[in-house]
Image (spheres, coloured by chain):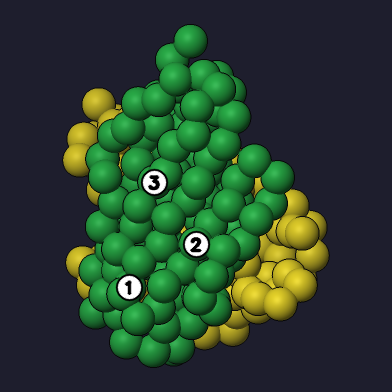
Chain colours: A green, B yellow
């Protein structure tokens, strides 16, 4: 099976940088996704990593190390609207998406 | 990307009753999924809805409790049967679609269910 771990909650200040970590254990790794979910809304796609390294997309970047079973989502220039839950999800060959427990981020003024 | 709608958006139900949730996609998709998200929790996959055959259920979920229909490639229903307060949750359908270089899941807006 798959095991995914994320910090439960994080707090950061507007304008700052925050890094949300995700560790996973799986066989047949086939990709890692980050989703953002605002309270009461559906998850929306943020990023996808399948190869080692950093993927940058505006204020958001995601990093993957397959050998370490580790990913992080980096959010720069934090805004109040970034307060949300961030879900790490892993896919493996022949298996469906498995979501981590999610990290609830609070951005304070 | 696929656009997904769900009905109802929310409902309050009595213990012992059943509720059917509908999921409609604006394009034909092969893979449709049903998830449950309990308050403050992450998403748990209930089942994969297969067109033309029975749904494939994850461990801990059974067809008698969560019957699923998938009559065509754009529509699915999930029924929550004989409800109890423990079934209070958000139920989300999603579809898998190929985007750029990878398969990605797109989610419907969810159905917020409260069981009294």
Q: Are marks 3 and 2 in contact (CB under 8 Å)?
A: no
Q: Are marks 1 and 2 in contact (CB under 8 Å)?
A: no
For mark 1, what is the residue?
A: A69
Output the chain of dot 3. Answer: A
Which quadrant is the N terminus of chain B positioned in?
bottom right
**Residue appearing at x 43%, y 15% in the figure:** A108
The residues bearing labels 1 and 3 have C-alpha atoms spaced at a distance of 14 Å
Q: Residue B110 location in percent, x, y?
A: 52, 42
Q: Residue A76 location in percent, x, y?
A: 57, 36
Output the chain of dot 1. Answer: A
For mark 2, what is the residue?
A: A63
Earlier residue among tags 1 and 2: 2
Label 2 crowd bin: few (<14), some (14–19), many (20+), radius 10 Å:
many
**Residue appearing at x 53%, y 40% in the figure:** A75
Q: Quadrant of residue B41?
A: top left
A68 sits to left or right of B20: left
For mark 3, what is the residue?
A: A20
A20 sits to left or right of B60: right
Output the chain of dot 2. Answer: A
User: What secondary structure is found at the residue carrying circle 1?
Assistant: loop
User: What secondary structure is found at the residue carrying circle 2?
Assistant: strand
């Amino acid at each position: 099976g798959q095991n995914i771990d994320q910090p439960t909650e994080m707090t950061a200040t507007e304008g700052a940088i925050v890094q949300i970590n995700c560790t996973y254990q799986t066989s047949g790794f086939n990709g890692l996704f980050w989703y953002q979910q605002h309270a009461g809304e559906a998850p929306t796609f943020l990023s996808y990593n399948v190869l080692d390294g950093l993927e940058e997309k505006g204020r958001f970047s995601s990093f993957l190390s397959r050998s370490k079973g580790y990913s992080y989502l980096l959010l720069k220039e934090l805004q109040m609207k970034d307060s949300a839950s961030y879900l790490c999800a892993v896919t493996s060959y022949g298996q469906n998406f498995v979501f981590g427990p999610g990290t609830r981020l609070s951005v304070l003024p | 990307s696929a656009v997904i709608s769900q009905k109802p958006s929310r409902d309050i139900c009595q213990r012992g009753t059943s509720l059917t949730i509908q999921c409609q996609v604006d394009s034909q998709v092969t893979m449709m999924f049903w998830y449950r998200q309990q308050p403050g929790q992450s998403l748990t996959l209930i089942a994969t809805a297969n067109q033309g055959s029975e749904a494939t259920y994850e461990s801990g979920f059974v067809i008698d409790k969560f019957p699923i229909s998938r009559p065509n490639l754009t529509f699915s229903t999930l029924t929550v049967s004989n409800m109890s307060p423990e079934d209070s949750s958000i139920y989300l359908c999603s579809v898998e679609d190929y985007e750029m270089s990878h398969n990605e899941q797109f989610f419907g807006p969810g159905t917020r269910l409260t069981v009294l």
